[in-house]
Image (cartoon, grey):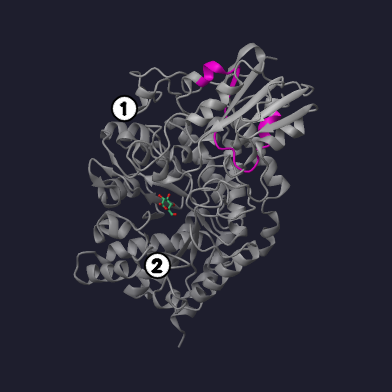
Amino acid sequence: MKSNASIFMLSQLTYRSAEKSVPPHAVTIALEAKIDALVSLMTLEEKIGQMTQVRHFDDIKPKDIKNKHIGSVIHTQGGKPGTSAKKWQKLFKSLQKKALKTRLGIPLLFGVDAIHGQNTFEGATIFPHNIGMGATRNPSLVEAAGKITALEAQATGFNWVFSPCVAIPYNEKWGRVYEAFSENTNLTSELTTASIKGHQGTLSDPTTVLATAKHFIGDGATDFGIEGGDCTLSTKELNQHLLPPYQAAVAAGVGSVMASFNTLSKKPMHAHKQLITDTLKNDMGFDGIVLTDWKGYSRFGENKIINAGVDMVMAVDGDLDDFQNGLKAGVESGKVSIDRIDDAVRRILRQKFRLNLFDNPYALKSLRKQIGSPQHRAIAKQAVRESLVLLKNKKQTLPISKITSKIVVVGEHANNTGLQSGGWTVNWQGTKENYKGATSILDGIRKQSEGTVVYDKDASAQHFDADIAIIVVGETPYAEFFGDIGNGKGTYKLNLSKQHKEYIKTYKNKVKKIVVLLISGRPLVTTTQINLSDAFVAAWLPGSEGDGIAEVLFGESNFVGKLPHSWPKFIKDCQKKYGPNNWNNSIKPLFPYGFGLQYKN
Ligand code: BGC
């Protein structure tokens, strides 16, 4: 008699030959039949296992992949597999081998927070954070960045990324503004489509990955911009401003959607059946995986979240056994229906089949040499150039002539690739050090200039004999609630630090021309500093190709970036529930959404 596993392999072969010769709807039928066949073979424990995502460190012991029937592994802040991509692939391959040796041999999904490039691997190509990609308004570029991120993620062993964040930030005090493309819904929807196309491609191609639209829903629209706070928007507002990017994501075939930490009128989003099941799955037709966010099971209502429509649980930090035992007890007591479990498992298997993981479970070794390649970096540098927004250019201070005899570059952000890249770079909270493969803003200025360039890290060297001062100021890296302002947890204000304001004051009136470059994950209230400067550029968080900035400052390329957010004028305007968004006429911003100057021809 054939074992269950070999019956399954037979159906796989049928499917593969069918795929080549029959139209798409028949392929879908074949896919669904295959999923049915596999689900019918699974025990309850195996089903709950498929719904489980764990870290490869801390959460599990070696035998747990088999014993706890794990369906997915996440890599995030914590133990790294090593310094080489070879080691990363090796670790995930060894886990995959364990999964393939289980009774049914269902492959694992490996997920990673590749937010702006495969940023967890030092040496990968790091793109500007999404706010900068929003400033480019260039869907082809966003698609290309997604494609490269997918390839570099595969090259380090992953088949799933937790990106793009498709939030619509309502308040710049939110610590995750930079993870989102824009405050504008139409632009966000357009770039969401591009990002998903780029990441997912055909999905079955081994250079592509599953993408995740996150965080569903209201993450960026909580009162006062508090991460995980309460979103009090009306249903009308929600439908009008927050849902369209998800509609775009679903239309683009996104593989997963991550539930959000926030509540919606006090109800946890993880437990919001009406939005997750009725709206996202039934009305919009989303057939992929709804994943929790961090420890979502214990934090947001345990089995209630499964009944609301969550399919996979990030069972981290001690949640693994509580989740698996709790859900099993829920099914046995009839509180969670087996139909709900089967639906969740079907969704997970569907994505595994679409990724072609049953045929190609391992990441390709050949991709490793493309990590951080010159071709990838050239696209990231193009994104840096196109993301820059020129806010002021008095008497054509810019472009800077290459033969300017002396330029002083001021500020630690000018000479530190960690500081220029923001959170989610090498580490969760970013790094304040230079990292492998990246170029700094100062490197770029040195490359462009044919005169003398001196560097003054903290405005103490006072090179007042320079013809021009390029002063680089901004925010120190942060991620998630660490970047929130105003809820008592964040130490960053929605303006510049005293020290950075001093850099500008020190050089003002001492050097003929002052160019200020702002490195930040959001617009800051910089009205005074803009007034003091001759030219002012919002450079966002450019990532690894910092030298691209100088190519625009010295006129090799024109500015094309447009503000993805309205730019606040006064601190008081940012103390309200929502900031000066482009649809909120009650607050007049300093610069409207879409503003951006260019060099005259
Ligand atoms: C974040 C998610 C992220 C997850 C996994 C959470 O804290 O909100 O965006 O994907 O961690 O690292």
* Picture residue at 62% right of the left edge, 59% below the top: 155
* Picture residue at 28% right of the left edge, 32% below the top: 236
Count of picture labels:
2
On screen, residue 53 versus residue 323, left or right, reads right
* Picture residue at 68% right of the left edge, 35% below the top: 442
Is 357 above or below relative to 193? below
* Picture residue at 48% right of the left edge, 23% below the top: 526
Say whether residue 137 is visible.
Answer: no
For disc 2, the neighbor class at 10 Å (few under 14, some 14 to 19, many from 20) is: many
Q: Horizontal and vertical percent for residue 500?
A: 53, 30
On screen, residue 556 versus residue 482, left or right, reads right
Which residue is farthest bottom? 1
Residue 446, labelled with which disc? none
Q: In this view of the protein, which residue sits in the foreground, 346 or 269?
A: 269
The amino acid type, in three-letter code, at marker 1 is: Lys
Residue that carries the numbered disc 2 in the rendered image: 50
Q: Which residues are magenta?
A: 529-551
Q: In this view of the protein, which residue sits in the foreground, 427 or 405?
A: 405
Q: To which quarter of the image does residue 596 belong? A: top right
Residue 288 drawn in magenta: no
Q: Horizontal and vertical percent for residue 332?
A: 22, 72
Is 321 above or below relative to 171? below
Residue 576, labelled with which disc? 1
Q: Horizontal and vertical percent for residue 36?
A: 39, 67
Alpha carbon distance from label 2 to label 1:
44 Å
Q: To which quarter of the image does residue 321 belong? A: bottom left
Which residue is farthest top? 395
